[in-house]
Image: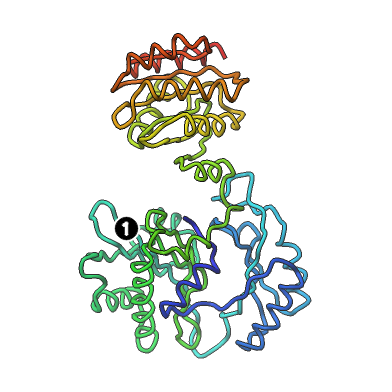
Amino acid sequence: MNIHEYQGKEILKKYGVRVQEGITADTVEEAVAAAEKLTADTGTSWYVIKAQIHAGGRGKGGGVKLAKNLDQVKEVAGNILGMQLITKQTGPEGRKVHKILVAQDVYYPGETPTKEFYISVLLDRTSGKNVIIYTTEGGMDIEEVAESHPEKILKEFIDPAVGLQGFQARKIAFGLGLTGEANKEMVKFVTALYKAYDETDSSMFEINPVLKTSDNKILAVDAKVTLDENALYRHKDFVALRDLNEEDPLEVEASASNLNYVKLDGNVGCMVNGAGLAMATMDIIKLSGGEPANFLDVGGGANAQTVEAGFRIILKDPNVKAILINIFGGIVRCDRVANGVVEAYKKIGDIRVPIIVRLQGTNAEEGARIIDESGLKVKSATLLKDAAARVKEVLAEA
């Protein structure tokens, strides 16, 4: 589950990570009031206005601006609030900005120059360890740095059984070229950051940039955080951090029905029980000349209600030209699924796209008979290759 920058910073602060202070605003008036409070609290006279959306590259898209006085705060906030912000990660449709963060200016003059770094913490699935990725090339697109200067991307692997060790935090600080007070501050920063990542059961903490200020403080200027949804039962307070405005409406609807759904750009809707089978089904669709329109896992207990919910979600995608239902009857019997398909089809009514149902496993033959004798425009298949051939046929007719 992705959360906003300001929410990620609040989590970091609880673990002792120094952050760029800021106050959120939903209106221009709130933005001006936030700037005034920041001046009173931090002494800042310049302000950074940041669009709060679940996507990176906000600055290049015009979603991060500097305001040097309250009049500029009013102007910039008015321009960003309500804008359709387009970045590399939003796609061409962009995201509407509903909230902004008014943050203090931390690039103030001092005895030493400021310096930006990149630090992230995530799981490395190959090694089965957590990894801290860091580089001196902060404030830049990390993918571009990895492509043009891979030697500047450094990694420190951490055994989750023992956690981050002191020598590793010091190694990272030295690897970033820091000495003296800045080195000590970075050791504290990395230690607190890893603790926040570990104890919140997060999938990723990405700080870009991490800033060394002109007086050698180390702080998070940005925070991109992904929480592990499977661990939310241990962090019930995190559930309230979810922003449905930032999620695909169909994915939100699917989650309300306990369906695992991800919208894609293809023309064949998929409804499958089991993530592995869903991936194989998407492969077979591509091999048949089609493109999967979604990933949809209805789980092991597929019934008329879940099938109906899946149908309704898939049919809301105007690009869908056919639907392939691929069910392996292990926990659930195939005849029960077939009855669920027939019942859902009749309940929804006017379904204008062809449907292929492939059933295999417990009572598969009985399930196929129910489909074939239903009188509906639903075609059954037993083998996956047969289902693929039927998908190819209906696409050719479309």
Above/below status of 231 relative to 318 = below
Q: Identify which amino acid the numbered label 1 is placed on.
A: Leu
- In the rendered image, the quadrant that contains the C terminus is top right
Frontmost residue, 89 versus 191:
191
In the displayed structure, does residue 141 sit left or right of residue 44? left
| Residue 210, x across and y down, in percent | 46, 73
Q: Residues within 10 Å of mark 1 (few under 14, many from 20)?
A: some
In the displayed structure, does residue 369 sit left or right of residue 376? left
Frontmost residue, 220 versus 336:
336
Residue in the image at 63% along x and 71% along y? 24
Residue on which disc 1 sits: 123
Local SS, label 1: strand
| Residue 46, x across and y down, in percent | 67, 80
Q: Which residue lies furthest to the bottom in this view?
A: 111
Quadrant of the rendered structure where residue 201 is? Answer: bottom left
Residue in the image at 56% along x and 22% along y? 321
In the displayed structure, does residue 21 sit left or right of residue 202? right
Above/below status of 85 relative to 182 = above
Frontmost residue, 255 versus 151:
255
Above/below status of 249 relative to 233 = above
Residue in the image at 44% along x and 21% along y? 339
- Total labels: the figure holds 1
